Amino acid sequence: MAAMPDNTHSTDSGRQRTQRRRARLFALRSPIPHSVSLSVTIGLFLSLFGLWALASYGEWVRPVFLPTPTGVLQRAVTLYQQEILVRDLWISNVRVFSGFLMAVVVAIPLGMLAGNMRIFSAAIDPFMGFLRYMPVPAFIPLLVLYAGIDELPKILLIFIGTVVQMTIMVGDVTRQVQADLIRAAMVLGANGREIFRKVIWKGSLPGIVDTLRINLGFAWTYLVVAELVAADEGMGFRILRSQRFMQTDTIFLYILLIGLLGIIFDFLFRRFHRWAFPWSQEGLRK
Amino acid sequence: MSAFRLEATDLTRTFESGSQAVVALQSMTLQVGAAQVVCLVGPSGCGKSTFLSLAAGLDEPTQGSLYIDGVAIEGPGADRGMVFQKDCLFPWLSVRDNVRFGLGLLETRRSHGASMRRLREHCDELLDRVGLWPFRDSYPSQLSGGMRQRAGIVRALATRPAVLLMDEPFGALDAQTREDMQILLLELCREQATTVIFVTHDVEEAVFLGDRVLVMKPRPGRVVADVAVNLPASRDRHTKLQQDFQAIRGEVLDHLYQVMSNAEPSG
């Protein structure tokens, strides 16, 4: 019914029209007005924040369990003045991005090979399936044993946490480059290397960038685990230590900051995607 | 030395499926002269697409050979262009870069600057010729189906191939666009003296485009009739209304119905 032109309902009452417009907002896979979409997004954040404010200022919950928004803000200022906040942010970003970039460097070639040459897929796919179910924190004792307690084991943990999933996803992305395009390139005289470079690589790049965006999220989720390893600074470390001193405001602050960083990086990745691949702006994953 | 542009002798292709061997194409012999348009019609599985793959060099025959100007085909080459049912343009390249894709590959192999420049100009001329010059910097996704298919044809003709292989290229287009494309194709191929092998399901299209129409039958795939289309070389919309045209179309249809009725019982 949503597809019917509006002029056939010119005799309808205003109420019926409102009802229909409301129904259209819930139609399957149909566009909704941008204003509605934006207000839903912002509305959710605001109502959650409102709930938090109510519960904390109204002292529904004891402050030691739920700090107030101003309490969290004050803590942020204090930590900033003590030069802890920036330092924690910096070191955690360095760890996350080092581990993530190591994973990128390994996963893209492995995924490309697994996705396009059967001999590599025979080696890589079952092996990744084997690694995939292993619990990443279980590697901590080995990492400490092999790599000591400096930066390396923390970075390696984030690497281990992301590389497997990333390889599998990159493999899937390159496999999705249509066989028709490969055939077209062959007929135009392209050899194997040229097909790999000019068709498969070019065709899967947008999907690879999107895969990286998703995996950066996974990398951040491993940060707290990574900073279990003999850390004395960093966002994950600060969260763990604050539990011992019942500093819930610090925990809230750092969890929210990680979420904020996530939104920012996600936004930057999407922007880059739209700028770099104007030809491919459909079917982006969430 | 063979006098034919494209020649197939005893061309056979069988596929193993489990313990059974399926004969996709059986002892096909065919001679096509320069600048001739040959259309292949027939039900699914009659080997017409198999023939195109062999001619394109994407597949190898089980037996027999294919020659272009007397030289056996070994893999794809710049002497043949192919247009697919789906346009198969590279979505990340502009129309112009798509059309020049084959040239770019040639350039990395040989170093003949002068003729390369000539070919590049030829590309631009063709784009202009099919009305795509204003859209040369657009991505394929920004074009209509007919425009994409025109770009596909230009891409296939860019390296000045002797033979153009077409696999139901207009099947997905609406009737009006389809007719425009048929006329455009005939004009382009006459200008370039290109030999065309055209696979289609549409008998009217086959008679309109072809100098010959080959009717094929499945299981095993082979040619059962070679109908000469004795119509004037210059054809337009009115050609399809002429009695001669309808008579030839009727003849091809008769062959096709016979193929269908023979094919059915054996299942």
Image (spheres, rainbow, N blue to C red):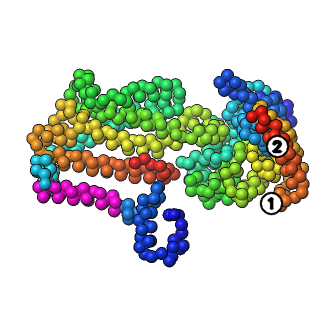
What numbered label is drawn on residue B256? Answer: 2
Helix or strand or loop: what does disc 2 sit on? helix
Percent x, y of residue A34: 40, 63
Q: Are marks 1 and 2 in contact (CB under 8 Å)?
A: no
Q: Chain of mark 2?
A: B
Q: What span is colored magenta in the figure?
A: A39-59
Bin the neighbour count of mark 2 within 10 Å (Cα to Cα): few under 14, some 14-19, many 20 and up.
Answer: many
For this rendering, which residue is in front, A12 or B162? A12
Q: Residue at x 11, y 51 (%)?
A: A63
Q: Is residue A233 visible?
A: no
Task: Answer few, some or many: residues within 10 Å of disc 1's Cα (few below 14, many 20 plus, some between 14 and 19).
Answer: few
Relative to B58, A31 lies left or right: left
Closer-to-camera residue (A33/A164): A33
Give amino acid for label 1: Arg
Residue at 41% x, 70% y: name it. Answer: A18
- Real-space CA distance between mark 1 and mark 2, rounded to the nearest whole angstrom: 24 Å
Q: Mark 1, chain letter?
A: B
| Side of B91 relative to A16 (left or right) | right
Q: Tag on residue B237?
A: 1
